[in-house]
Image (spheres, rainbow, N blue to C red):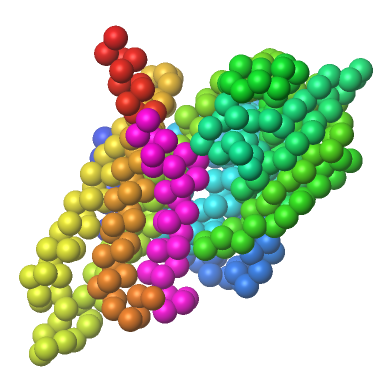
Amino acid sequence: MGAAGRLAHLELPFFDDGHRALAAALDTWAAQHLQQVPHADTDTACRALVRALGAAGWLRHCVPAAQGGVHETLDSRSLVVCRETLARHDGLADFAFAMQGLGSGPLSLAGSEALKAAWLPRVARGDAIAAFALSEPGAGSDVAAITCSARADGDAWVLDGQKTWISNGGIADFYCVFARSDGSGARGTRGLSAFLVPAGTPGLSVAERLEVIAPHPLARLHFDGCRVPRDHLLGAEGEGFKLAMRTLDIFRASVAGAALGFARRALDEALAHARRREMFGQHLADFQLTQAALGDMATEIDAAALLTYRAAWRRDTTGTRITRESAMAKMVATEQAQRVIDRALQMHGGLGVRVGTAVESLYREIRALRIYEGATEVQRLIIGRETLAGSA
C-alpha cells in the first residue's frame, strides 16, 4: 500500500495538518531507517532505537517544550500518531518510543524544575532511557496492594521493596518509582508517592531479567536501603496514585494507537497474501470467505480507530481527564487488533506460524499489548465505574 493509502485515516477531523505532516514524515523515516537496526540482541537494539529516534527528533513529542519538546504540554494525538506509525513498521521501535514518554511522564507532570532540566532534554535527545516502575509481584492491576516502602531519613528518602515487569528494566538511566510513604504498611491508594531514582543508585539492583513472547527489555528490580535525595520526590507526598493515573490517562490512548498500527500492518499483509496466493485455480482473494474476513478486519480497525482518536482529541482540545474514553480505546483497539491479526495469521496458513514472518511477530506483539498498562478486564471495570459516576 502506498503512503497515501497508509495515511488515509488521518483525513478524519480529529487531526490537523501538523499531525498529518508528522505521520507522513515519520512513515518515510521509519521505512528508510528502522530496518538498519539489528534486532538480534534486544537490549542493544532498544538502545540503538532510542538513540535513532532521539537524533531524528521524534522523541521531542515525549517531553514538554520547556525541556526541548515540540508542544507546550504533551499532545495526545501526536503520541497516538507516532505510535500507530511506528508499530506498523516495527514493534520494538514503538516500544522504545512509548517508554521514553511513559517512563518520563511522572517527571514531566510533577517533577521539580531542576529535575526536569536535568533529565527531560536527555530523554528528548535519546541520551537517557526512562522507565515507569509501578507494578510489583503482588500489585499489578491492584495498585492499592503496593508494598514497596519509602521513609524519610534526614535529607533523603529510603526505598525498600521490589518492582516487576518493569519495561526498560536493566537498561534505563532512571526510574520513576511509586512507593508507600505513609509508613502505615496498609493497603490503599492513599499514602503512595513517586520518586525519581537514577540507575546506579546504591541499593537499587536488577534482581532478574524477564523473557516474554514479544522480546522487550523487562526486569524485576530490588530496592534495599536505596537512598535518593529528598528533592527527588515527584509531586506532593501522598499524591503518587493520582500522578500514576494522570500519567496512564495520557499514554493509555497511545497504547490503542500502537494496536491500530499492528492491526493495519496485519491487514496489509493479509491483502497482499490473498492477492498472490493461488489455490483451486484462483486466488485466495477471489473466495467469498476471504472477502468477508477482510471486510470484518477493515471494519474492526475503523471502529477501534474512532474510539482511539476521539480519546486523544478530547484530551487535547478540552484539557479534561479522559479516563473513560482512554479505557474504551485501549480495550477495544487491543481486542480488535488481536482478532484482526489472528485472521491474518489464519489466512497465511502454515506460513503464518513460521518464526520471523510479519504476522507471527505481530501475533506475539499484540498478545502482550492486551495486558500491559491495564489488562482488558481492568479497562472494563474502569469504564463501568466511570459510567456509574457520570450518571449519578
Residue lying at the far front in this picture: please name it. Answer: 186
Q: What's the residue at 50%, 66% (across, down)?
A: 32
18 or 39, nearer to the observer: 39
Place residue 47 in its image quadrant.
bottom right
Residue 143's spot in the image, x, y percent? 56, 30
Residue 356 can be seen, yes or no: yes
Q: Going by the image, does 62 lie left or right of 351? A: right
Residue 237's spot in the image, x, y percent? 70, 16
Q: Going by the image, does 279 lie left or right of 81? A: left
Position of 359 relative to 75 (above/below): below
Residue lying at the far bottom in this picture: please name it. Answer: 281
Question: Is 167 covered by the magenta stretch?
Answer: no
Place residue 15 in its image quadrant.
top left
Q: What's the residue at 64%, 30% (across, down)?
A: 146
Q: What's the residue at 15%, 82% (across, down)?
A: 283
Residue 11 can be seen, yes or no: no
Q: What's the residue at 20%, 77% (across, down)?
A: 275
Residue lying at the far right in this picture: please name it. Answer: 154
Which SS type dominates the magenta stretch?
helix
Position of 297 relative to 141 (above/below): below
Please report the bounds of the magenta region as a residue range. Answer: 354-381
